[in-house]
Every structure is written in structure tokens, then in C-alpha cells.
Image (cartoon, rainbow, N blue to C red):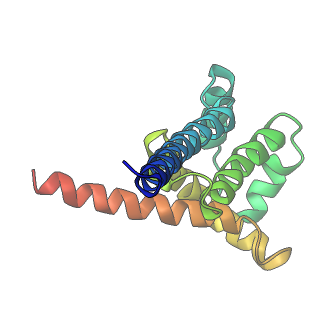
Amino acid sequence: MNVANIQVTYYMVAATGVLIAAIYYIIDLRFNRRARAMEICRLHTSDFVSEQGMQRYMQVMSLEYKNFEDFTKKYAYDLEIGPKFVAVLMMLEASGIIIKNKVVKPELFYDLGACGATATWEKFKDFIQRYRALYSQDQLRNAEFLVQEMQKIRTRNAAQFKTR
């Protein structure tokens, strides 16, 4: 064996080591990304899925009103209901931001219960649209994005169940 062969063998072993390290790094990076996404979901939804969070959501979903003016008159300045209503809508808004910025896949939020965002949106859509017309056109745009994504997933899932 001459020096050239030893040198070639050395380079091949070194290149193989670098390749193995790169593959390990990519696998580790993908695993950490998934773990980070799950942790973000857990932290983001922990309050909402708690007993207190569910009570708050159920109270907000049980609100009855005829129109924007009626809602404002009944609940806007109610120090018990007003903050709960805002908290529920801000949860949807924050979820929409997380999905829109591709921090977490929409399917993960859907599986964690964000599919209920559609019911919340439908219940308060008239209120939100009137609020937008009066104050801010882009109010809750990320919540609306979340709802649209949840509806896409629901439609896709419905098609899958029909084929079974």
C-alpha cells in the first residue's frame, strides 16, 4: 500500500464521517422542530383547555344577542363577560398568527380542538364584521384565517370519511 492509497482512504473515511454528521444533524433538526411545534401548541392551548378556560368558552358561547348594538349594550362593559369574550377572540387571533407564520401546521391545531373556532366565528361573525366597519377593517384577520384553514381541513377530512 502506498502513501496515495492511504491518503485516499483517509479522505474517504473523513468524508463519510462528515456525511454521517450532516445526516444526524438534519434528523435532529427535524425532530427538534416537531418537538418545538408541539411545545408551542401545548403552551398556547394549556389555558384554553383547562377547566377554567372551558368554562370561559362555554359562557361566551352561551351569550345571546340580536345585533351589534344589542351585544354592545348587554356585554361590552360587563366586567365579567367582556374580558372573557375578548380572551376567547384573542385565543383565535393568536392561533391564526401561529398558523399563518407557519410555526405550527394547521392540522395540529385542528386535532387539538381548534376545529371549534368555526362555531365561535359563526356565532360572532356579524358582531366582528360590524366592529370592523366601525373601527378597524383588519380586526381579527388572523382569527378569520384560522377559521378558513379549519374549514379546509374539515372539508378534506369529510371527503376522506366518505371514501371509507
Q: Which one is in front, 50 or 55?
A: 50
Residue drawn at (61%, 29%) of the image: 54
Place of residue 89 in the rendered image (x, y in percent of width and height, measured from the top left): 71, 51
Residue drawn at (45%, 46%) of the image: 13
Q: How many marks?
A: 0
Is residue 99 positioned above or below 57 on the image? below
Q: Quadrant of residue 25?
A: top right
Residue drawn at (53%, 49%) of the image: 18
Q: Is residue 14 left or right of residue 63?
A: left
Residue drawn at (67%, 64%) of the image: 142
Q: Is residue 83 left or right of residue 91?
A: right
Q: Which one is in front, 126 or 104?
A: 104
Is residue 141 positioned above or below 25 on the image? below
In the displayed orientation, state which residue is furthest to the top: 51
In the displayed orientation, state which residue is furthest to the front: 2
Q: Is residue 111 left or right of residue 145?
A: left
Q: Quadrant of residue 157?
A: bottom left
Place of residue 120 in the rendered image (x, y in percent of width and height, measured from the top left): 57, 51
In the displayed orientation, state which residue is furthest to the left: 164
Place of residue 115 in the rendered image (x, y in percent of width and height, measured from the top left): 46, 48
Q: Which one is in front, 84 or 106?
A: 106
